[in-house]
Amino acid sequence: MDTSYVLGVIAAMGLVTFALRALPFVAAQWLQKHPVIQSLGQFLPLAIMTLLMVHSVADSASANPSGPWSELLAVTLVVLFQWRSKNALLSILVGTGVYVLLRNFNVV
């Protein structure tokens, strides 16, 4: 291998990596005004959190020998607290606390 060829490839990879990471910051002023980006900004966070929760609950429920009841109760409490209080941090704390208590004390 030629040293100049290897250095050129490394420089090209570094330049492409830098450009890909800088692109969102450079294009932010145009992207913020685009209607598709605005609708994604409203919809995507909820969709990602829902997918993460479904994946986590399905994994935990299948590994739990006593069944999915503690997971279902924790998720139900999170949904109820979020619906009533509109406070995501409180909902997550209540759901996580109840889930940990149920799993550690084998109540359900």
Image (spheres, rainbow, N blue to C red):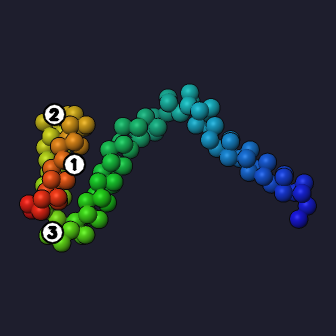
- Answer with left or right where residue 10 lies relative to residue 32: right
Is the residue 51 above or below the residue 27 in the image? below
Q: Nearer the viewer, residue 37 or 23?
A: 23
Question: Label 2, label 3: how many angstroms apart (C-alpha)?
Answer: 29 Å
Q: Which residue is mark 3?
A: 67
Q: What residue is at 50 percent from the left and 30 percent from the top? A: 32
Q: Position of residue 85 (x, y in %)?
A: 16, 33
Q: Position of residue 54 (x, y in %)?
A: 28, 58
- Closer to us: mark 2 or mark 3? 3
| Residues tagged 2 and 3 counted as in contact (Cβ below 8 A) | no
| Residues tagged 1 and 2 counted as in contact (Cβ below 8 A) | no
Q: Nearer the viewer, residue 101 or 21?
A: 101
> For the residue carrying disc 3, how many other residues have a C-alpha within 10 Å: few (<14), some (14-19), or many (20+)?
few
Q: Which residue is mark 1?
A: 96
Q: Nearer the viewer, residue 91 or 45?
A: 91
Q: Which residue is mark 2?
A: 85
- Answer with left or right where residue 33 lies relative to residue 106: right
Q: Quadrant of the C terminus?
A: bottom left
Is the residue 8 above or below the residue 26 in the image? below
Residue type at tag 2: Ser
Residue 63 in sight: yes
Q: What residue is at 12 percent from the left and 59 percent from the top? A: 105
Q: Closer to the N terminus: mark 2 or mark 3?
A: 3
Q: How many marks?
A: 3
Examine the image and state in which quarter residue 86 appears.
Answer: top left
Question: Label 3, label 1: how many angstroms apart (C-alpha)?
Answer: 17 Å
